[in-house]
Image: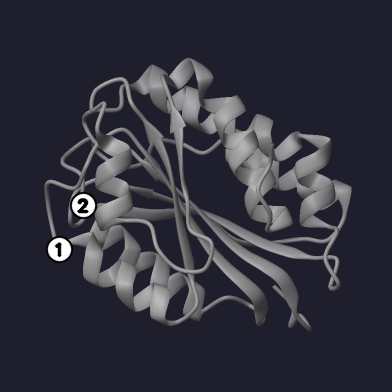
Amino acid sequence: MAALAGADLALILMADCSASVTYDEFNLIAGGMAAALRDTHVVAGMLGGPQRMTLASVLLFSGRDAQDVVVDWTRIASPAEAAAFADAVDNVPRVLRPGLTAIGNALAVASALLVRAPCPAARHVVDVAGDGRANDGVSPAPLRDALALAGVTINGLCVLHEEPDLVAYFQQEVIGGPGAFALVCGDYKDFAEAMRRKLLREVTDRPIA
């Protein structure tokens, strides 16, 4: 990617690919992210800041040694670029073997990914979507705290079909930074709408009614 002057937002979409996520559910995650990214209001938000540009990437994670940046930093500075990014997200392969859930290790990879962003951004957001708490690798809380101290926002999209108390866990151990929030999704069939609402709040930097 050529050198860029600056972006309004650097956004990492992190998705759980552990054993609790079936292949059908993973397809709902990828398709739901893509559908949300095609929403006209989301696109307008990504292009509506002073720089008229968002940087976005996608990181899949499972166990402590299983993280993969499946869509690297992508400039979104036009509706066509937004559509191309959504298409790339729609077609991401499930490259990771299903395993345990290492949210902390994934946050460490996200931190390194933010460091190598192709240009400065006014805001940095890590968007963690999953259906379970960490059960492998390092604890997410210290990584969350370090990112928050650096001004990074970590938000959560909690799919509650297996762990009904997941939001409380995310609030205690995962989310943090300026304006951080955790959004509830009852099941993967509702993932696209939940992600749309989450992205609207993230790209516009304000709550959505």
The label on residue 102 is 2
Mark 2 residue element: loop
Tell me the residue that label 1 is attached to. Answer: 138
- At horizontal 51% and vertical 79% (from top left) the residue drawn is 116
How far from the left and from the top, in percent, is residue 124? 57, 69
- Local crowd at mark 1 within 10 Å, few (<14), some, or many (≥20)? some
Specify the quadrant that holds the N terminus: bottom right
How far from the left and from the top, in percent, is residue 46? 77, 55
187 to 67, vertically: above or below:
above
The label on residue 70 is none
Q: Amino acid at mark 2?
A: Ala
- At horizontal 27% and vertical 36% (from top left) the residue drawn is 166
Query: Cβ–Cβ below 8 Å for labels 1 and 2?
Result: yes
Q: Amino acid at mark 1?
A: Val
- At horizontal 23% and vertical 71% (from top left) the residue drawn is 142
Would residue 21 be found to the left or right of residue 91 on screen?
left
Question: N-terminal of the two: label 1 or label 2?
Answer: 2
Would residue 131 be found to the left or right of residue 83 on screen?
left
